[in-house]
Image: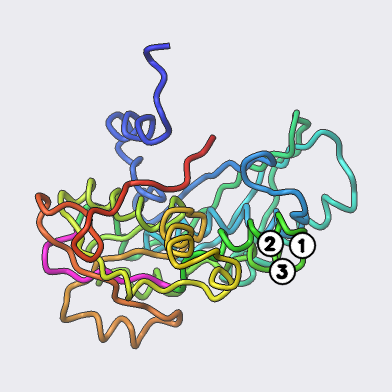
Amino acid sequence: MDNLMDERAALRQLAATLPYAGDDAAVVDDTAITTDMLHETTDFPAGTTRYTAGWRSVAASLSDLAAVGASPTAAVAAYADTAFDGETLSEFIDGAQAVCAAVDAEYVGGDLDTHSEFTIATTAIGAVDESVDRAGATPGNRVVVTGRFGRSAAALRYFEQEAFDTANDLFQFTPRVDTGRTLAGVATAMMDSSDGLARSLHQLAEASDCGFAINRAAVPVADALSEVADDREDRWEAAVHFGEDFELVATVPADAVADVRAASPTPLTEIGRVVADDEGVGVDGEPLADRGYTHA
């Protein structure tokens, strides 16, 4: 039992022994590759359609490619279920193909198997001209993010309310591939926010040996979350710590912010700056807790 570790400790162990591990995707020469596994009990609430499951599963891997500045080319999935049903399998494929088409990639197949619960393992590959990792943030850089946070947290609450149409729509996010390419070559560090904005900042800080000073009022929050949050603190907690939003979090030189914001096809918001390591990760002068999504 003494050898048990959490997911982040396991990832650190792998990164210490595997030269291409540690970032959202591995970059080997001019190719980026990544893989993800999602389970019914932890990733697909009751009411999730198989179309949404196909979209979201593949989108998670495509988002990893976006986070290193890659252009996706293809994705595959290993599809496991307690039994095979032609209609639900077709719906899954439709969702997988649709999200690939949204980023000019192709869904090209995969594997089928039976399992004790619905489980998907996806792999995506892409081409890289200039890749971005997590280790280059420098004090004075600015922190920019795509989109708005709290979309998935809102979706979960709609699933709980059995407002399934709204929940499924919110779960079908578009990977920020175009903006990832825009930031490649400019960003000093980048990752996606699948584990939550707060945890992403801590992960970037650890990789880059830096700290962050974040402006709470600048953090963009999804309108859908504002509609279901209990109050201001609940809204903040869900937006920053829940995770599963798959927005990009990047650091860029201060003099490049205006240019990348103008060039990005997705709105970019400046939310803070990079500071020295001994200043830690904070928001409005207070420590920002390292809490976020944890795979169980």
> What residue do we see at 67% from left, 39% from top?
41
The answer to which of 26 and 197 lies nearer the viewer is 197
Position of the C terminus, as image quadrant, is: top right
Q: Is residue 272 left or right of 196 when viewed as pictured? A: left
Spatial distance from mark 3 to mark 2, Cα to Cα?
A: 7 Å
Spatial distance from mark 3 to mark 1, Cα to Cα?
A: 5 Å
Name the amino acid, label 2: Tyr
Position of the N terminus, as image quadrant, is: top left
Give SS at disc 3: helix
Q: Is residue 295 left or right of 15 when viewed as pictured? A: right
Q: Is residue 287 above or below residue 254?
A: above
**Residue 216: x, y in percent?**
31, 69
Q: Are marks 3 and 2 in contact (CB under 8 Å)?
A: yes
Q: Residues within 10 Å of mark 3 (few under 14, many from 20)?
A: some
Q: How is the image coloured?
A: rainbow
Q: Are marks 2 and 1 in contact (CB under 8 Å)?
A: yes
Disc 2 target residue = 158
Q: Residues within 10 Å of mark 2 (few under 14, many from 20)?
A: many
Q: Is residue 144 magenta?
A: yes
**Mark 3 vs mark 2: in front:** 2
Q: Which residues are magenta?
A: 137-146
Q: Please give the label number shown on residue 48.
A: none
Disc 3 target residue = 166
Q: Is residue 195 above or below residue 174?
A: above
Spatial distance from mark 2 to mark 1, Cα to Cα?
A: 7 Å
**Residue 120: x, y in percent?**
66, 43
Q: Are marks 3 and 1 in contact (CB under 8 Å)?
A: yes
Q: Is residue 135 magenta?
A: no
**Residue 187: x, y in percent?**
26, 68
Disc 1 target residue = 164
Q: Earlier in the sequence, mark 3 or mark 2?
A: 2
